[in-house]
Image: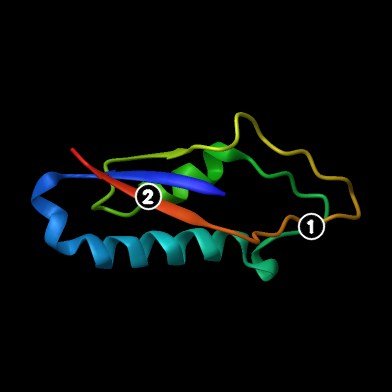
Amino acid sequence: LVITIRIDRELKRQEPDIISFARSTILDYFYVDNREFGQDFILQDLIRSVHEIDMVRFATVDNLDDDIRIEHNEIIQLNNLTLNVVTI
């Protein structure tokens, strides 16, 4: 999963903290105890979670174009995460 977050230029010195908050939010979203079998991966739900971080202006998922539909006996997992930061 590749996500780009955009932060204000004035927050550049806080970038490590913002990355930590964003990474924790994303990992929490995918944490197995927070998911259910057959629960689809909805891009906007994840983006909404990242937007709840006050210091994040905007976020995009860069390598997926659409939601991922899951079969009733499957559960989504996050194996790789790349988090990019752009200052605006």
Where 15 falls versus 65 (above or below)? below
Residue to which mark 1 is pinned: 75
Where 42 falls versus 72 (above or below)? above
| Residue neighbourhood size for the residue with mark 1, other residues' Cα within 10 Å, grouped as few (<14), some (14–19), many (≥20) | some
Residue occupying the point 26% across, 53% down? 54
- Left or right for 1, reference 36: left
Residue to which mark 2 is pinned: 84
Name which quarter of the figure residue 14 lies in: bottom left
Answer whether labels 1 and 2 touch (C-beta < 8 Å).
no
Q: Secondary structure at mark 2?
A: strand
Residue occupying the point 64% across, 30% down? 66
Q: Who is closer to the viewer here, 56 or 4?
A: 4
Q: Give the quarter of the figure containing the C terminus.
A: top left
Question: Percent position (x, y) of residue 80?
Answer: 59, 59
Question: Percent position (x, y) of residue 46?
Answer: 52, 47
The amino acid type, in three-letter code, at marker 2 is Asn
| Residue neighbourhood size for the residue with mark 2, other residues' Cα within 10 Å, grouped as few (<14), some (14–19), many (≥20) | some
